[in-house]
Image (cartoon, rainbow, N blue to C red):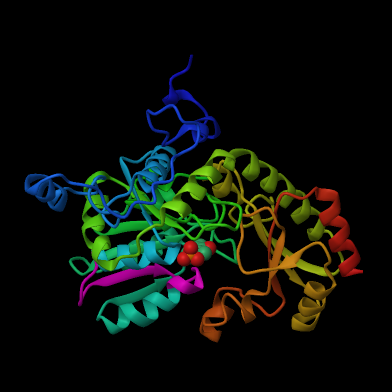
């Protein structure tokens, strides 16, 4: 039998994080606290780091099973789960950055991350410089030695599908580097294998994969994750055991879901690219994507999302979303349903208009997340709606 380390990631995802009890599914530990028996036990619990058996905000067995699974799939020593993706980002940034520190961030990022950097971070005296992530040199060039504590990147970015060169990012010495890898999932790419310090996911999306959990997670070296843990227990964005259970259940089927979604996404992206009503489709799996070679180098699957720029501006975009019957409007991705969103007026509403223009979030751009339906049903829904 091949050892776990030699198995393909989707095989390892079936058992990753499983405990020794023999149970094929994880137990749901709803407990908020444990009997520590005596004062010595209480002292041990109060001084232990990220260890179960004391208080659930410090560690919970169900949450820890999920964390172990993510660490195994990302190839890291440790992982730490949070109540949401934003909980992971906010806790990590405030754990690592203080007043007077400096962050270098990619310009094209999740709108919630941008709002956090422009709002609370600025208010706390943490400076942010934005760079064009597609040009790998810009991150390193913006680092202010002794002042820059963190570099934040997202790849693929959403809804533009820009890619960051993980090897170039991981080679930067000095500040910590953090990659939001949500769109790729742990089976699509593993940033820490390239020297990136922290990989982050909104597990609300493809990892949980069924629109039934709000969950975040980071992965990295144990010493760094333990340091972030010691701040995170005060920040309190602690993962719920039930959501961690759904996150773990999602991981079990992530391999087959991601493969199906990536295949359907590529076929739809190809079909839409050739449609006369379409200007352009952005998908890392398309040979027309400007960074397709980089995508092939660092991604094992190209993912469930693409965006489509249609002819006729915002009116045509609005009409298309109304004409689609099978494909619904909802602001999430990675689940069983194929969904469409108009980023400029919804998820990215808060983004500065100049930044929107600079990062290609046009009025005619629609983001599509491909679910688990049959390709032919999705194609005919688009065909009827575009006719
Ligand atoms: C959804 C999302 C987040 C935030 O995650 P929540 O679980 O909604 O807090 C962060 N980054 C990306 C890329 C996301 O898609």
The residue that appears at 77% across and 79% down in the rendered structure is: 318
Q: Is residue 374 visible?
A: yes
What range of the chain is rendered magenta?
A: 96-113
Where is residue 82, by image quadrant?
A: bottom left
| Quarter of the figure with residue 74 | top left
Residue 327 x, y percent position in the rendering = 77, 63
Query: In the displayed structure, would residue 21 be above or below residue 373?
Result: above
Q: Position of residue 242 (x, y in %)?
A: 46, 53
Image quadrant where one finds the C terminus: bottom right
x, y (%) of residue 175?
Answer: 26, 59
Give the residue at x 88% y 57%.
Answer: 380
Whether 53 is drawn above or below 182: the answer is above
Q: Is residue 29 left or right of residue 252?
A: left
The quadrant where residue 19 appears: top left
In the rendered image, residue 125 lying in the magenta stretch gets the answer no
Q: Is residue 231 left or right of residue 353?
A: left
The one nearer the camera, 284 or 10, is: 10
Q: Position of residue 381 (x, y in %)?
A: 86, 61
The outermost residue toward the left is: 40
Res 165 visible = no
Residue at image position (40%, 37%) is: 72
Count the marks: how many? Answer: 0
* Closer to us: 203 or 110: 203
Q: Residue at x 41, y 61 (%)?
A: 83
Left or right, 218 with reference to 255: left
């Amino acid at each position: 039998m091949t050892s776990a380390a030699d198995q393909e990631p989707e095989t390892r995802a079936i058992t990753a994080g499983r405990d020794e009890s023999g149970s094929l599914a994880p137990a749901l530990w709803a407990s908020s606290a444990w009997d520590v028996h005596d004062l010595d036990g209480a002292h041990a619990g109060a001084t232990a780091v990220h260890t179960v058996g004391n208080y659930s905000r410090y560690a919970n067995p169900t949450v820890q099973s999920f964390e172990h699974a993510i660490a195994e799939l990302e190839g890291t020593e440790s992982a730490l789960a949070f109540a949401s993706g934003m909980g992971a980002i906010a806790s990590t940034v405030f754990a690592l950055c203080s007043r007077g520190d400096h962050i270098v961030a990619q310009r094209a990022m999740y709108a919630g991350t941008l709002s956090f950097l422009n709002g609370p971070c600025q208010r706390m005296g943490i400076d942010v410089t934005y760079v064009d992530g597609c040009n790998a040199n810009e991150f390193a060039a913006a680092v202010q030695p002794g002042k820059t504590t963190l570099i934040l990147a997202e790849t693929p970015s959403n809804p533009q599908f820009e890619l960051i060169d993980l090897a170039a990012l991981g080679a930067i010495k000095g500040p910590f580097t953090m990659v939001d890898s949500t769109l790729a999932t742990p089976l699509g790419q593993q940033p820490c294998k390239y020297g990136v310090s922290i990989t982050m996911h909104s597990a609300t999306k493809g990892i949980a994969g069924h629109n039934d959990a709000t969950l975040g997670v980071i992965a990295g070296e144990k010493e760094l994750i333990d340091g972030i843990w010691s701040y995170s227990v005060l920040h309190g964005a602690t993962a719920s055991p039930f959501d961690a259970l759904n996150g773990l259940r999602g991981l079990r089927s992530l391999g087959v879901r991601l493969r199906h979604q990536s295949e359907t996404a590529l076929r739809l992206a190809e079909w839409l690219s050739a449609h006369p009503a379409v200007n352009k489709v952005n998908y890392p799996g398309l040979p027309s994507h400007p960074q397709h070679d980089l995508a092939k180098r660092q991604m094992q699957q190209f993912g469930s999302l693409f965006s489509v720029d249609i002819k006729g501006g915002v009116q045509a975009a609005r009409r298309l979303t109304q004409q689609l019957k099978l494909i619904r409007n909802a602001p999430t991705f990675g689940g069983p349903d194929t969904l469409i969103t108009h980023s400029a007026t919804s998820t990215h509403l808060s983004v500065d208009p100049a930044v929107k223009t600079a990062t290609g979030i046009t009025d005619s751009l629609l983001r599509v997340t491909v679910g688990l339906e049959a390709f032919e049903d999705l194609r005919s829904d688009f065909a009827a709606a575009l006719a």
